[in-house]
Image (cartoon, grey):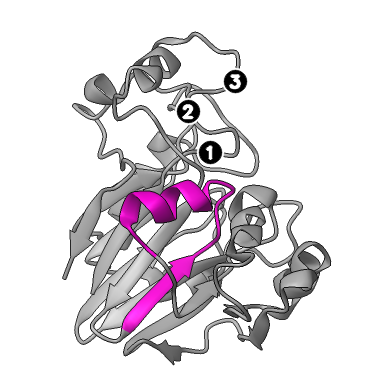
Amino acid sequence: MRLTLLGTGDAVGTPKIGCKCPACEDARKGGKSQRLRFSILVESEKGKILIDTSPDLRQQFIKQNLSCIDGVIWTHGHYDHYSGFGEFYRVQNKVDVYGVQENIEYINQFVYFLKPRYHYVKLYEPFELIGLRFTLFKVTHPPVEVPTGVIIREGDKKVVITGDTNSEIPEASLELMKNPDLLIADAIVPPNIHIKKHMNSEEAMALAEQLNAKKIALIHLSHLFRPHHIESLFLPLGYDGQVFEF
């Protein structure tokens, strides 16, 4: 199993349009503060799956030399997690898409013209793709009705992706998330800032400790952090193009 963080930014990405903060300036110079919007590539010997379809999907595919994938999992219906699906136009037809019914039906309003092949998934029930076992679990990301995170298993290896969430994750999900080899966690802002629908970095690190995560990558990061080369001395910040192999 191999995971590549295609995009580790929040909804506006870094650099933010019109911003001259230190992180945005570092991003413009080509530093690791440069962050495309959220998407993760999951690979096995049997294929490739995308977790969410970033608005920057075309750029991400070109960077990774990707031409097609075997399926998409959508975590929820916010535009920075699905709107890049349109980039499959004249590239790949009838893409297989997996997710809970509420999210798929909402997103379908915007991408129906591409005629995706939809597969409804039930929360907490594992399903197999490309030889890996995936499970969607409920998180809390108001006002989304059923936001989800993703667990990926291969043998005794376990990866947990929180999706977009605040720290009020349901107990049933927390139980399922325990003891990951890798936790990829939403941490949109530094500790001194609180946002109702996301975790800050302090809350994400507390979750990692609670779950007994062996390795952590903080993602969905805003430009409000210090430049990556400084902030990463203190926090396990993910970065675009980062690869994890198991």
Q: Quadrant of residue 33?
A: top left
- Circle on res. 17: 3
111 relative to 57, above or below: below
Who's the residue at 34% across and 81% down the image? 47
State which tag comes first along the sequence, 1 or 3.
1
Question: Hey, what amino acid is under mark 3?
Answer: Ile
* Residue 154, numbered circle: none
Image coordinates for residue 99, horizontal then vertical, percent: 61, 77
**Mark 2, secondary structure of its residue:** loop
> Residue lying farthest right?
109
Percent coordinates x, y for residue 134 in the rendering: 42, 81
Residue at position x 35%, y 69% from top?
42
Range shown magenta: 47-66
Which residue type does callout 1 highlight? Answer: Asp
Q: Which residue is mark 1?
A: 10
Pointer 3 and pointer 2: residues touching (CB < 8 Å)? no
The N terminus - image quarter: bottom left
For label 1, the crowd category at 10 Å Cα-Cα, with few meaning under 14, some 14 to 19 and many 20 or more, is: many
Residue marked by disc 2: 14
Image coordinates of residue 80 in percent, x first then y, are: 62, 48
Cα distance in 3D space between marks 2 and 1: 8 Å
| Local crowd size for mark 3, using a 10 Å CA cut-off: few (<14), some (14–19), many (≥20) | few
